[in-house]
């Protein structure tokens, strides 16, 4: 089954981002740990653009909830548009005056414009892969006839728009390699339009154009004459928060008007669910999965052409991923196994009692993913957040552990079920991405391609530490720094976290951190609860009613870094995006005394109303909903927007937002910035940067990535008082 659409975007697991009133956002909020950090003498307040407030107060489950900046939710309103323009202009003027920008831009240009190639996908006799180029803004999809054929451009999003605002989304070649279905995404948003191209001629079909492809993943039939896909209606009368529940699974016949596409699975009607389809490579088995968040799903199947669906399994607190091959279903599940296991299922006897366990749960490693390549199972495990790749027979008999170049992050094997060659990528914090080819049969591993980055990997070191969180839980954290670091509490440190949606933070390469390290800085990644590093139990311990554990884990990381004299509060910056933006928002409102600066990207911050905007209702299984009394109590207790206090001096804040984010509504960023700017006791900078023509993942042009990285690190160097080396600092490798 296809992977879940995650809330995360500006985050990659192998690494998100922007006059006083009697009614403040905190006027009805309960006291928080922030009360322990009273206003202190500091720089004078910046002259921010004026923001009015209103005496808006809701009573929810008996609790009065103030919302003085609700008017900022209406992005289309002229007043809100003017406010956004004024805030972004003010921020960019302030950032432009910060020193060291030219050196940063030069170094980021060296680091971000690189040549690279992805692992190839073989379809028929053709190979498909992506390349980045030193002189191109966006990655290009290529194809070639045979392994030694001439490379030809297939999809070049650099040529799709003059301003670079149209992006490439999903792309899927047919099994015979003759056609490719792909999505175009205006403004790098999630909303998309599917197209079909003839590979040999490069001709785009004028008929096979499908709107409503926000969640679409094409699943080709073996003959290449059509594909199944997830379709979302574009009817403007359907409210944004209700749209996910209208997703249907359709079948498209090439050359047919998409308006006549047959619905093969009706909508669920529940906006908190996802509907996803899949088709076995031989075309014999069609699947539909109804996902309730990131913790459970139901799986149905049938033979194409049959009317009725058959229930394979009803998920009750467990999730199931099905890999079909040769009249067997290989089911990966955490049912009764928090770290996951694998079953083999005969579709003729698919009742749960007949399932046969072929790979048992490993009590010391979490099973991240499974693929079927070369007639074997390839299993990607995490041991303390680092990758281990294992190969077994289809019956689960161990064959070997794939030799990796070192301790780092590797993808699972990419290949075909019946062919021996397979590929995987590997990197570490200080090793750029490398692609390896391996023989499933022999185990031989060869370097196939690697990214060349101007750096000396031997100049840096990585260590993994374990610290104790508030409730006694041991939490791992990676630390990266230049060799020779003196632990005297003076190193500028950037602490990153995510903590949600079963997303695991792994030690993968980030070119952006190199100048930060060269300036004597430390880069820290905490493996917080809510992720998948230790399986389902680790995720469950950081979601729903347990969400506060994530924030406690993060505070524990900050306290450890100070206690062990890596840094101190005034030199410690925190960074997170999307769900990680919620993390750093909660961190700065709960424990502001621990941090010197905050970079918050495309975040959720109003947890009382998040479910009413964007894709919010699909995250209710992860967070809960304010419509439920008990869940409201939990959400309101940590909702960052509602815990901005008038008499607290908060860390310097750079909020990084996008104007076309249709996943997490930018209203969160606007309302939070307004609340922090208008406190009485805060004098630290609070800036809102809005990326134009960009979605949840930001703009996908290298030049835009350089601009945002320069802004981010110039801000951090300035507010933390870091002495900049000639090379400058860093952000995120693209």
Image (spheres, rainbow, N blue to C red):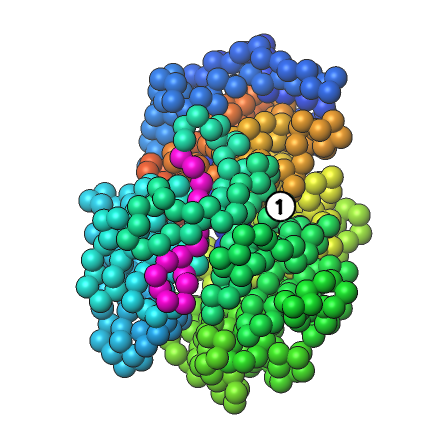
As displayed, is residue 685 above or below residue 325? above
Residue farthest to the right, as pictured: 472
Q: Is residue 603 magenta?
A: no
Q: Is residue 229 magenta?
A: yes
Residue 294 appears in the rendering:
yes
Q: Residue at x 51, y 66 (%)?
A: 284
> Which quadrant of the rendered structure holds the N terminus?
bottom right
Is 254 in front, or is 623?
254
Q: Residue at x 68, y 64 (%)?
A: 350
Residue farthest to the bottom, as pictured: 442
**Numbered disc 1: secondary structure:** loop
As displayed, is residue 2 above or below residue 575? below
| Percent of width and height locating residue 720 | 50, 42
Mark 1 Cα within 10 Å, few/some/many (few <14, many 20+)? many
Residue 364 appears in the rendering:
no
Which corner quadrant of the image does residue 593 belong to?
top right
| Residue assigned mark 1 | 293
Q: Judge from the rendering whether residue 53 lies leftward or rightward of residue 179; answer left or right.
A: right
Q: Which residues are magenta?
A: 220-234
């Amino acid at each position: 089954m296809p992977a879940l659409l995650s809330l995360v975007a500006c985050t990659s697991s192998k690494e998100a981002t922007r006059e006083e009133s009697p009614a403040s956002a905190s006027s009805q909020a309960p006291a928080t740990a922030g009360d322990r950090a009273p206003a202190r003498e500091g720089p004078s307040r910046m002259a921010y653009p004026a923001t009015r407030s209103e005496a808006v107060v809701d009573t929810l489950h008996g609790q009065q909830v103030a919302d003085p900046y609700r008017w900022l939710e209406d992005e289309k309103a002229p007043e809100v548009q003017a406010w956004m323009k004024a805030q972004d202009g003010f921020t960019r003027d302030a950032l432009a005056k910060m020193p060291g920008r030219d050196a940063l831009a030069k170094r980021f240009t060296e680091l971000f414009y690189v040549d690279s190639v992805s692992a190839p996908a073989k379809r028929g006799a053709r190979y498909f892969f992506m390349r980045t180029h030193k002189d191109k803004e966006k990655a290009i999809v290529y194809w070639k006839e045979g392994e030694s054929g001439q490379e030809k451009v297939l999809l070049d999003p650099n040529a799709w728009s003059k301003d670079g605002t149209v992006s490439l989304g999903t792309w899927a070649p047919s099994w015979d390699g003759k056609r490719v279905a792909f999505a175009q995404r205006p403004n790098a948003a999630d909303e998309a339009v599917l197209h079909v191209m003839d590979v040999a001629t490069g001709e785009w079909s004028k008929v096979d154009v499908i709107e409503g492809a926000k969640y679409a993943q094409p699943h080709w039939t073996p003959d290449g004459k059509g594909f199944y896909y997830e379709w979302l209606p574009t009817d403007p009368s359907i409210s944004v928060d209700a749209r996910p529940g209208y997703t249907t699974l359709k079948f498209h016949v090439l050359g047919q008007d998409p308006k006549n596409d047959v619905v093969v699975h009706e909508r669920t009607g529940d906006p908190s669910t996802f509907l996803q389809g899949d088709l076995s490579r031989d075309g014999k088995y069609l699947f539909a999965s109804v996902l309730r968040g990131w913790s459970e799903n139901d799986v149905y199947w049938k033979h194409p052409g049959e009317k009725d669906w058959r229930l394979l399994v009803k998920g009750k607190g467990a999730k199931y991923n099905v890999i079909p091959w040769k009249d067997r279903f290989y089911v990966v599940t955490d049912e009764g196994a928090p770290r996951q296991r694998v079953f083999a299922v005969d579709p003729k006897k698919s009742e749960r009692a007949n399932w046969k366990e072929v790979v048992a749960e490993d009590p010391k490693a979490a099973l991240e993913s499974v693929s079927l390549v070369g007639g074997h199972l390839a299993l990607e495990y995490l041991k303390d957040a680092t990758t281990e790749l294992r190969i077994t027979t289809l019956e689960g008999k161990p064959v070997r552990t794939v030799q990796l170049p070192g301790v780092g992050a590797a993808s699972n094997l990419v290949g075909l079920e019946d062919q021996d060659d397979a590929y995987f990528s590997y990197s570490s914090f200080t090793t750029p991405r490398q692609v390896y080819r391996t023989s499933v049969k022999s185990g031989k591993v060869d370097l196939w391609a690697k990214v060349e980055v101007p750096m000396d990997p031997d100049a840096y070191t990585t260590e993994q530490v374990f610290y104790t969180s508030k409730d006694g839980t041991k939490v791992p954290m990676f630390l990266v720094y230049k060799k020779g670091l003196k632990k005297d509490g003076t190193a500028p440190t950037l602490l990153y976290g995510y903590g949600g949606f079963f997303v695991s933070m792994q030690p993968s390469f980030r070119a952006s951190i190199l100048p930060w390290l060269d300036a004597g800085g430390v880069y820290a990644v905490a493996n917080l609860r809510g992720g998948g590093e230790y399986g389902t139990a680790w995720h469950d311990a950081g979601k729903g009613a347990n969400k506060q554990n994530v924030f406690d884990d993060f505070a524990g990381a900050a306290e450890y870094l100070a206690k062990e004299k890596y840094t101190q509060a005034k030199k410690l910056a925190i960074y997170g995006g999307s769900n990680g933006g919620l993390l750093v928002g909660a961190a700065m409102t709960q424990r502001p005394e621990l941090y010197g600066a905050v970079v918050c990207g495309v975040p959720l911050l109003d947890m009382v109303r998040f479910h009413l905007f964007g894709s919010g209702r699909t995250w209710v299984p992860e967070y809960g909903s304010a419509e439920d009394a008990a869940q409201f109590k939990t959400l309101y207790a940590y909702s960052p927007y509602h815990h901005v206090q008038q008499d607290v001096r908060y860390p310097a804040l750079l909020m990084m937002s996008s104007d076309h984010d249709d996943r997490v509504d930018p209203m969160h960023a606007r309302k939070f910035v307004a609340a922090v700017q208008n406190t009485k006791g805060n004098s630290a900078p609070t800036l809102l940067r809005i990326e134009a023509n960009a979605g949840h993942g930001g703009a996908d042009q290298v030049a835009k990535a350089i601009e945002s990285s320069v802004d981010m690190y110039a801000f951090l160097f300035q507010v933390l008082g870091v002495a900049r080396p000639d090379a400058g600092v860093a952000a995120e490798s693209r």
